[in-house]
């Protein structure tokens, strides 16, 4: 089989760092309030179109090293992930890694920056390593990144609307 370029690039030739993005939205709340909402992982189902039922392990909370599980769904499939908090700076940033800090597959980061009477919320997604469960070609991984980009945009819009209606 010969190496190709483009959407059919073989898994072995891909670089995980090519699959990342960041999106931003302004919300009508102070950074500390937005941090509290986002770091309460059990609330993600209010905003995310494909993540639900997230809960910290017993006795854990939004602090570095804490683990939580969450249910996800896409294209009629459901699965559960375990994630570990790797950054928890109240009012500033919240980051977790799906699969844990040591063996993680995806990093989700949120940061909060005051602007006027509200906050610019920045949400980032970064593939940390390649895994066939996510796709085996550049086309697969581009489609995953695009899907997750749409999900993040919907999440940020829903978060802003929820805060505005609160």
Image (cartoon, rainbow, N blue to C red):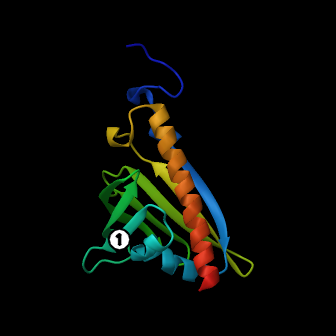
State the image coordinates of residue 48 (x, y, percent, origin top left).
49, 65
**Number of numbered tags placed on the structure image:** 1
* 91 relative position to 10: left or right: right
Q: Residue 44 sits in which quadrant?
A: bottom left
Q: Position of residue 148 (x, y in %)?
A: 50, 52
Against 51, residue 40 (above or below) is below
- In this view, the residue farthest toward the front is 76
Farthest left residue? 58
Dot 1 lies on which element? strand
Residue 135 picture location, percent across and down: 39, 38
* Outermost residue, bottom side: 166
Establish if 93 lies above or below 4. Answer: below
Q: Residue at x 56, y 78 (%)?
A: 34
Q: Nearer the viewer, residue 99 or 53?
A: 53
Q: Quadrant of residue 165?
A: bottom right
Residue lying at 72% horizontally and 82% vertically, measured from the top left: 117
Residue at horizontal 37%, vertical 49%?
Answer: 105
Mark 1 lies on residue: 53
Q: Is residue 82 left or right of residue 115?
A: left
In the image, residue 83 sits, relative to residue 132, either above or below, namely below
Quadrant hosting residue 152: bottom right
Circle 1 residues within 10 Å: few <14, some 14–19, many ≥20: some
Q: Residue furthest toward the right?
A: 116
- The answer to whether any part of residue 30 appears in the image is no
Quadrant location of the C terminus in the rendered image: bottom right
Residue 138 position, x and y percent, is 48, 32
Say which quadrant the N terminus sits in. Answer: top left
Which residue occupies 30% across, 51% down? 103
């Amino acid at each position: 089989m010969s190496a190709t370029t483009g959407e059919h690039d073989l898994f072995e030739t891909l670089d995980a760092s090519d699959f990342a993005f960041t999106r931003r939205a302004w919300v009508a709340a102070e950074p500390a309030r937005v941090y509290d909402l986002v770091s309460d992982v059990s609330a993600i189902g209010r905003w995310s179109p494909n993540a639900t039922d997230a809960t910290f392990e017993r006795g854990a909370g939004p602090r570095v090293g804490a683990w939580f599980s969450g249910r996800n769904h896409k294209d009629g499939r459901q699965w559960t992930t375990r994630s570990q908090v790797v950054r928890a700076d109240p009012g500033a940033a919240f980051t977790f890694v799906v699969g844990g800090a040591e063996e993680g597959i995806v990093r989700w980061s949120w940061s909060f920056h005051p602007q006027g009477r509200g906050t610019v919320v920045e949400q980032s997604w970064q593939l940390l390593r390649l895994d066939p469960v996510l796709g085996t070609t550049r086309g697969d991984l581009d489609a995953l990144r695009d899907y997750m980009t749409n999900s993040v945009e919907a999440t940020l819009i829903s978060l802003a609307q929820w805060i505005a209606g609160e």
